[in-house]
Every structure is written in structure tokens, then in C-alpha cells.
Image (spheres, rainbow, N blue to C red):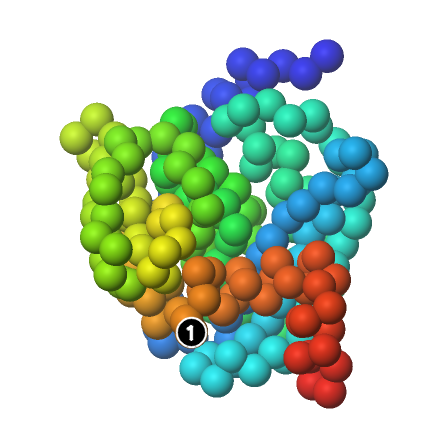
Amino acid sequence: MINTQQLRQEQTEKAQQIILTDQFTAPVFIAGADVGFEDGGAVTRAAIVIMHYPSFEILEYQIARIPTTLPYIPGLLSFRECPALLSAWQLIKQKPSLIFVDGQGIAHPRKLGVASHFGLLVDTPTIGVAKSRLCGIDKAVNEEMGSHEPLMDKNEQIGWIYRSKKKCKPLYISPGHKVSMAGALQWVELCMRGYRLPEPTRWADGIASNRRLFEQLNKNKL
């Protein structure tokens, strides 16, 4: 039987270890990380892609598939996703200075989304780039690309609501670990290339999904 109370307590304790200042210099190697599920949720799939910055040339990627260790429980997703992320991380040869994770950072009820949890486990700066809001007060954002508003929760800023592309739903950006609030937004902006997602998580998602477009674009590079 899963002790959800114990897992929530562990999140609260781990959240106290999260550092919200920039603990890196201008990175040469950045990463994107994405997690999905296969076989009706029985298999957890994690992809990590390593890119050169600022060229965004793909240098390496790894995909790990492991048996899912935890059912879906709201607020405890990082315990479900981190084992596969760690498996992919162990396969990566060129470790990055900064990781963009498809998911929440501190924009989480107990301030420990998957980006924060994973960043803490691998002791590497992380940024959470989520496609939907988990907590905090939603706010209308100007339709212009690059528009942003603070994501607030109980008078505390926990992230950003960011319009990455016109006519697309905004992203929810939050620092994961060893990244400041301002730094999280800045680095997402620096990694935008006209798509809804920043390049690291866009490619991680595409590689993990085996999308034909990404296979075609990348076939001569790897």
C-alpha cells in the first residue's frame, strides 16, 4: 500500500533544500527532459537530449523505458517520473549545466514539482516548463509573443505565465533548482525559436515520441 502522507512529507522536506538563486554561468551544454507513459501507463518513458548552446545542435540523446513504479496520484507525479529520468540521466555521457524539464518546478502545492525534484536528485540547475497550470492564480496574458505575468500563490510568486507564441496557450514557467525566478524566464526566452516550446523540451518531446518530423530533421546529425 502506498503511503501518500509519507510521500507528501518527503516533498515538504525536499522542498526546503531547493535553491532559488542562479548557480551556473553561461552554459555550453543544455538539456531538455520529457516523460511520458506507454502500454496504458505500465511503462514510463523518459527522454533527455543534450544540446550545444547557443547553436542548439543536438549532441546526444537517450531514452529510458522502465516499469512504472507508482500510479498517477495528483501532486505526487515527480515520484512517478523521476525513476525513469534518472535512468536516462545515467546513460548521458555529456552532462549539461542547465536542464529544461517538461513539468512544474516550484509551481507546485508543496513547491516540489518534477523539475525541482529531479534537479535536487542530480544536483543540477533545472527549469520547469509546463503546458498547464497546477497551482497559483491564473491571469490573462497579452496576446503578443513574449508577454508574461507573474504566477502568484498566496501573495508569493511561484513562477511565470508566459506567452511563447501568438494564438497558443501560455506556458507556465517556474524555477526548479539552483535557478532564480528571473533566470527561469530569461533562459526560456533565450531558448525560444518561434515554436510554443523552448528548443530543449521541444526536441526532448519530439525524440521521445519518435515523431517523423524530428527523425527526418535529425537523421543526418546523429
Note whether residue 93 is visible.
no
Residue 63's image quarter?
bottom right
Is 12 left, or right, of 162 in this rendering? Answer: right
* Residue 172 position in % (x across, y down): 37, 46
Residue 207's place in the image compared with 130, above or below, is below
What is the quadrant of residue 213 in the picture? bottom right
Foreground: 187 or 12?
187
Q: Residue at x 50, y 45 (%)?
A: 103
Few, some or many residues within 10 Å of mark 1 (<14, 14–19, 20+): few
Q: Position of residue 69 (x, y in %)?
A: 74, 32
The residue located at (72%, 78%) in the rendering is 216
Q: Is residue 96 visible?
A: yes
Residue farthest bottom in this picture: 220
- Near-viewer residue (62 or 209): 209
Circle 1 sits in a helix, a strand or a loop, which is it? loop
Question: Looking at the figure, which quarter contains the N terminus?
Answer: top right
Q: Residue furthest left?
A: 155
> Hey, what amino acid is under mark 1?
Arg
Q: Which residue is mark 1?
A: 193
Residue at 30%, 31% in the rendered image:
136
Which residue is at a point 44% across and 36% down the rendered structure image? Answer: 112
